[in-house]
Image: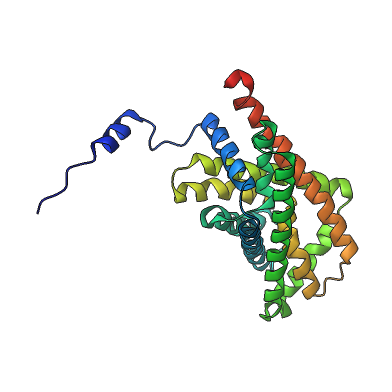
Amino acid sequence: MVFPPPDQSAIVHMMTDENNYDAYKPAKIAVLVEGVGVTKAQLPLLQMFVLAILAGAFIGFGAAAYTMVMTGVDASFGPVRFLGGIVFSLGLILVIIGGAELFTGNVLMVMALVDRKITMGMLLRSWAVVYTGNLVGAAGLAVAFGFTGLLDGSMGVTAAEIPRAKAALLPIEAFMRGALCNALVCLALWLSFAARSAAGKVMAIIWPISVFVLLGLEHSVANMYFFPQGWLAASGVTFIDALGNLIWVTCGNIVGGAGGVALAYRFAYLGSSNR
């Protein structure tokens, strides 16, 4: 059997790139994240909306799995909450590996805005379309679970308790939990950019996401699933209470992700002195 000659250019590239199999360094990640932000802002409207619906459903699957893990156990027991966080990580894994548009991750697009690679109009268009699509996907999945019969049993009891606890949060509590939550979510995304394999991205995602769930922090897109699921399980939480929680958590998500991660890393690695 005669084998084709090796690709000399590929060999030279591998020999000269000594870090070919290493994780990307933070400065390189900053460039990658900013470039992705530009790409996201330029997506056609329909494609953006469809990918946002998928992301909402993906996060919903993680939230549904979390609900089942927390069923029949003491919700304040740390190890169980951590297990719930690991299961909930499925949502972001599907978003990153499968490909979808998630609002809480898209706050990192602020990096591209600051460097004038996208306009404020492009940023707000993306956020509005993706946020709406996430809501459609997450709420739609909750409705689908309502037809499964799973919410009629013990899972339904947990499904009702989760939104009650969220609705009871004071505005400042919801805001701060949202800010801290999305700092961890955006760090999970940031770390996933460092990995060069799907397995590496999964491992990078699991730990920050598990920690935010363990600590009881607030994710706006997850709440887009939890509140409709709770209504189907007769939680008694009003629409006004749910809306109030979502507004404060969303504002916190923006501040924590855009300010705590995006702008901090932008000035650290993409500032004029670093170019």
Can the viewer see residue 76? no
Can the viewer see residue 116? yes
161, above or below 7, in the image: below
**Image location (x, y in percent) of residue 118:** 66, 38
Image quarter in which the C terminus is found: top right
**Image location (x, y in percent) of residue 239:** 87, 65
**Image location (x, y in percent) of residue 185:** 65, 46
Residue furthest left as drawn:
1
Relative placement, left or right, of 119 versus 174 is left
The structure's colour scheme is rainbow
- The picture quadrant where one finds residue 62 is bottom right
Image quarter in which the N terminus is found: bottom left
Q: Residue at x 68, y 65 (%)?
A: 137
Quick one: 245 or 14, which is closer to the camera?
14
Q: Residue at x 31, y 34 (%)?
A: 14
Quick one: 273 or 237, which is closer to the camera?
273
Quick one: 266 or 46, which is closer to the camera?
46
